[in-house]
Image: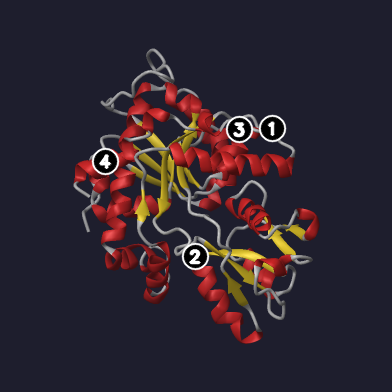
Amino acid sequence: MSPLPSRRAVRVLAPLVITVLLATLSACARGSGPSGPELALDAPLPTQVPEGTRLRIGDPQTKVALELSGEIGKLSFEVEWANFSGGPQTLEAFRADALDVGSVADIPPIHATWTGLPVKIVAAKFRKDPLDHPVYELGIAPGVHVRTLADLRGKRIAYSPGQAQGALVLRVLRKAGLTKDDVTLVELPSTGDVYVNALASRQVDVAPLGGVNIKRYLAKYGDRGAATIPHGVRDDPTHLYVRTETLRDPAKAAAIREYVQAWARAAVWVYEHPEEWIQGYYVKDQGLSPADGAYLVKQAGEPDIPASWTDVIARHQETIDLLAAESGNPVINAKDLYDLRFERVAADAIRKKGV
């Protein structure tokens, strides 16, 4: 493992104190805007990061990947790490001006735009063979008969609007030829083990489970009839996104460009060093067993970081159209969510590395 650099501060904000600190951070951050002229949103990205530049990043998994791979020692700017990711916390931090970069799926940028916060996606990552390496499976409560997607009719399904799991449920219903009127959507937050507990207690019949929760749910409740089934749709987008106004700061725009490059190289390093990743992240950082770590590595498969966003934007538009139809929100242009100046940044970083 590469040692942490001594020439920059690396601070971590724990989730339990995030809410308390947001107001304070917001007040401090408001004086940290561009000291010179603003960068036009269609101007070329600057490549030199000025001394003293700082980014606040909510991407704890990548933090560990950067440390293990040694990429963190190459960053030319200071990083303040927020120990959270995902849509709701990231959006809250963005609104409080307490975060510069967030790591999310494809739904939070849409939701942010609908709620009046202009944002831009600056990086996109997927999984090769996504149907063979899904992020989620549909968890089935003990005693509930669901063997195919058609069996979802009449069932109570956990639903988290504004998050990836919520959009997945809508996609699955459409694939099954069903509508929201054919099921009962039960709004529940998709955090922690909420969905696992809701299934086990029969609060819901079906819920999308991800990560190690799939394995643990089956191990704990399988003898009672718990099961999972594949959903058969793509669920693999991962994005880095920022507030549009952040990109008007030339220093931060340059630092974000550099971070995207390091993020991409770290993602490839994780795939190429599974044993080091299992021990360094899943076991040491997350407190999981080596078996759980190996399961998650196998489940994730190989990363896919495209050099063109044409298909990415088209798929995102399909998601927007689906969510708009179901929620009554206006249809937005998916292309407007992306800062196309960053389109090749991540892919070029991998190519130059010789991957």
Determine whether label 3 and label 2 are within 8 Å by CB: no
How far apart marks 1 and 2 lie (CA) works out to: 32 Å
Q: Nearer the viewer, residue 276 or 42?
A: 42
Residue depth check, mark 3 versus mark 1: number of the one nearer the observer: 1
Residue 119 in the image, given as x and y percentages of width and height? 53, 31
18 is higher (above) or lower (below) than 333:
below
Secondary structure, mark 2, is: loop
Q: Label 1: how many residues lie within 10 Å, few (<14), some (14-19) or many (20+)?
A: few
Residue behind mark 4? 349
Residue 111 in the image, given as x and y percentages of width and height? 62, 39
How far apart marks 4 and 3 lie (CA) works out to: 29 Å
Q: Considering only order in the chain, which callout, 2 or 1, is on the residue closer to the N terminus?
A: 2
Quarter of the image for the N terminus: give it.
Answer: bottom left
Type of amino acid under label 2? Gly
330 is higher (above) or lower (below) than 284:
above
Secondary structure, mark 1, is: loop
Residue depth check, mark 1 versus mark 2: number of the one nearer the observer: 1
Q: Label 2: how many residues lie within 10 Å, few (<14), some (14-19) or many (20+)?
A: some
Q: Considering only order in the chain, which callout, 2 or 3, is on the residue closer to the N terminus?
A: 3
Q: Considering only order in the chain, which callout, 3 or 4, is on the residue closer to the N terminus?
A: 3
Residue behind mark 3? 113
Residue depth check, mark 4 versus mark 2: number of the one nearer the observer: 4
Residue 10 in the image, given as x and y percentages of width and height? 34, 44
Type of amino acid under label 1? Pro
How far apart marks 3 and 1 lie (CA) works out to: 10 Å
Determine whether label 3 and label 1 are within 8 Å by CB: no
Type of amino acid under label 3? Thr
